[in-house]
Image: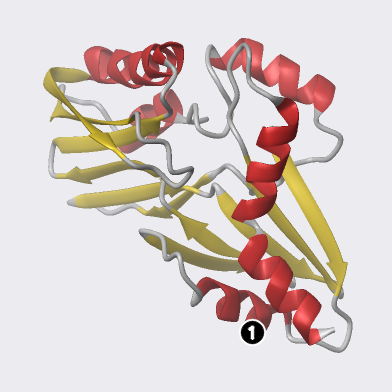
Amino acid sequence: LARRVSFDIKGLSGDALVLKALMAPPRADFAFLFSVEGSAFMGISSDPLYVRQGVKVESRAVAGGESKEHRLVGGALVEVFREFCRSYQVDCEKVTDKRKDPQALLMRVSGGLSEGVTDKEFLQALHPAPVVCGVPAEKARVFLQQYEVFARGWFGGPVGFFSKTRTELAVASHGCLVGAGKLHAYAGAAFVKGSDPLTLWEEAGREMKNIVNVVQGAQ
């Protein structure tokens, strides 16, 4: 589920506030910014969607300590590689993720795209990523449309670049929309059966702590 916090920032530089927040620790693997029709969407992400070099592709995902979460997130990723790659391999290792979960599992999946497979096809299969939607995707979408009370817009979408030889995309899993004197900060938290709603709500709030502190300090 996604969480949004909105601020009135008339008289303040929204872009400067967000950039200041992005420079504060903890840093992420990706930073992004783009502007459309007077609004800017920017943020950070530690959730890569995929990287392609030639026909070689790689993706990774971190699942929390729940074995069910491992199966859901990892299974969805492997299924895409099974469908679109002539061969692939899976490597897993235990890590401490951003939630300080000592049992978190990092899964890396790499392979070679089958002949004729395009970035468009591969992207459509991977998006929306389980980290921002859930699995199975269609059922998760129905749930989110029913229970989320705001439109996500660009939050949760793919950000990055395409080229003939290389593509690199990440999931916009933390972001801010700035425009018309408003700043909307977005973050989310994943849950499985048995998760504590209050804990997840607080987790999503921690993901936005830097930007909230910076904006409140400037007002």
Is residue 33 visible in this depiction of the protein? Answer: yes
The image shows residue 104 at horizontal and vertical percentages of: 36, 31
Q: Position of residue 10 (x, y in %)?
A: 89, 82
Identify the image quadrant of the C terminus: bottom right
Q: Quadrant of residue 62?
A: top left
**Quadrant that contains the N terminus:** top right
Identify which residue, 180 or 75, lies in the foreground.
75
Residue 113 in the image: above or below residue 37: above
Q: What type is the residue that disc 1 sits on?
A: Ala
Q: Is residue 61 above or below residue 137?
A: below
Residue name at image x 48 percent, y 43 percent: 99
Which residue lies at the image location 47% right of the left edge and 70% below the top edge? 25
Q: Is residue 171 toward the left or the right of residue 40 in the image?
A: left
The residue shown at (55%, 62%) is 43
Residue 40 visible in this rendered orientation of the protein? no
Foreground residue among 33 and 163: 33
The x and y percentages for residue 178 are: 74, 69
Residue tagged 1: 16
- Across and down, in percent, residue 148 comes to 80, 31
Residue at image point 68% right, 24% down? 196
Residue 19 picture quarter: bottom right
